[in-house]
């Protein structure tokens, strides 16, 4: 019998205006990084975790301004807590899926069983069962698209549409600080391009765009943060593997 763990979340202060929140009792392999950025007029939360317990309550002491919540894409490890918040944004390609709670896209083919009991080292509450896990619909979500700007007053993030991992995957880029929040488009681990809504050719194109990106601070959807050199290594490795003879993208 697994124990109930509260708090369910962990928070790490990176600097005064940047925090990383994780769910340490959920498998490290699929554990998302949720990023809280403090702005002058509003704050920004990038991704919301599994949604198995209240992120809004957990963050309450840190939230003293209007909060904008952006889902980097619709997958459950990023969008699970969106329903709790008022101002929620997601790329237009996945807007309907989040509004309606389309589990096929959110759980990325539930028949693959991506959310097994064994992925939970502890329980978020008594009686929790992964077999009943679903992401709640978020009808209040608003659609964003490439080029939109999320303005926090003293800093602003441009939406970059980077499909491939999923059709509505985005990154958020701050031109002033050159900090890039990459979601699941690129992180320092095995990249997933064979999910329900993945398109490898789109992924390659997105990666080629990112090769030009001026950034020395990548804050990814999973695993550790990295610099421009590592970003370029990860991109080049991905592209060369996908373009190797015999790969489907060459046929
Ligand atoms: Zn994903
Ligand atoms: Zn993910």
Image (cartoon, helix red, strand yellow):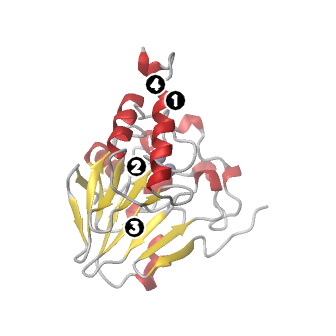
Nearest-to-viewer mark from 1 and 2: 1
Query: Could you give the CA–CA distance between mark 1 and mark 4, rounded to whole angstroms?
Result: 6 Å
User: Could you tell me which quadrant the C terminus lies in?
Assistant: top left
Asked whether the beta carbons under mark 3 and mark 1 sit within 8 Å of each other, the answer is no
Toward the viewer: 2 or 25?
25
Q: Residues within 10 Å of mark 1 (few under 14, many from 20)?
A: few
* Mark sitting earlier along the chain (2/3): 2
Say the numbered circle drawn on residue 74.
2
* Mark sitting earlier along the chain (3/4): 3
In what element is the residue under mark 3?
Answer: helix
Toward the viewer: 155 or 243?
243
Asked whether the beta carbons under mark 1 and mark 2 sit within 8 Å of each other, the answer is no
Q: Is residue 205 above or below residue 126?
A: above
Which residue corresponds to the image point at 63% horizontal and 59% vertical from the top-left?
Answer: 26
- What residue is shown with label 3? 84
Q: Is residue 77 above or below residue 85?
A: above
Which residue corresponds to the image point at 53% horizontal and 55% vertical from the top-left?
Answer: 222
Question: Would you say residue 154 is visible in this rendering?
Answer: yes
Toward the viewer: 228 or 189?
228
Which residue corresponds to the image point at 56% horizontal and 34% vertical from the top-left?
Answer: 111
* Mark sitting earlier along the chain (4/2): 2
Query: Could you give the CA–CA distance between mark 3 and mark 1, rounded to whole angstroms?
Result: 40 Å
Say the numbered circle drawn on residue 241.
1
* Mark sitting earlier along the chain (3/1): 3
């Amino acid at each position: 019998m697994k124990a109930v763990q509260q708090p369910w979340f962990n928070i790490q202060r990176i600097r005064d205006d940047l925090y990383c929140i994780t769910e340490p009792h959920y498998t490290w392999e699929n554990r998302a990084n949720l990023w809280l950025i403090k702005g002058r007029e509003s704050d920004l939360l990038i991704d919301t975790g599994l949604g198995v317990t209240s992120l809004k309550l957990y963050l309450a002491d840190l939230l003293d301004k209007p909060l904008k919540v952006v889902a980097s894409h619709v997958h459950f490890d990023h969008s699970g807590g969106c329903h709790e918040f008022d101002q929620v944004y997601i790329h237009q390609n996945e807007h309907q899926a989040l509004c309606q709670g389309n589990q096929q896209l959110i759980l990325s083919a539930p028949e693959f069983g991506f959310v097994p009991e064994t992925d939970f080292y502890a329980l978020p509450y008594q009686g929790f069962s992964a077999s009943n896990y679903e992401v709640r619909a978020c009808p209040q979500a608003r659609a964003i698209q490439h080029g939109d700007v999320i303005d926090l007053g003293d800093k602003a993030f441009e939406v970059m549409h980077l499909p491939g991992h999923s059709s509505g995957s985005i990154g958020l880029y701050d031109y002033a600080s050159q900090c890039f929040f990459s979601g699941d488009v690129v992180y320092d681990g095995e990249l997933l391009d064979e999910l329900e809504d993945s398109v490898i050719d789109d992924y390659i194109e997105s990666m080629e765009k990112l090769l030009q990106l001026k950034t020395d601070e990548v804050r990814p959807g999973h695993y550790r943060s990295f610099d421009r050199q590592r970003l370029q290594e990860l991109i080049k490795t991905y592209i060369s593997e996908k373009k190797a003879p015999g790969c489907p993208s060459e046929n």
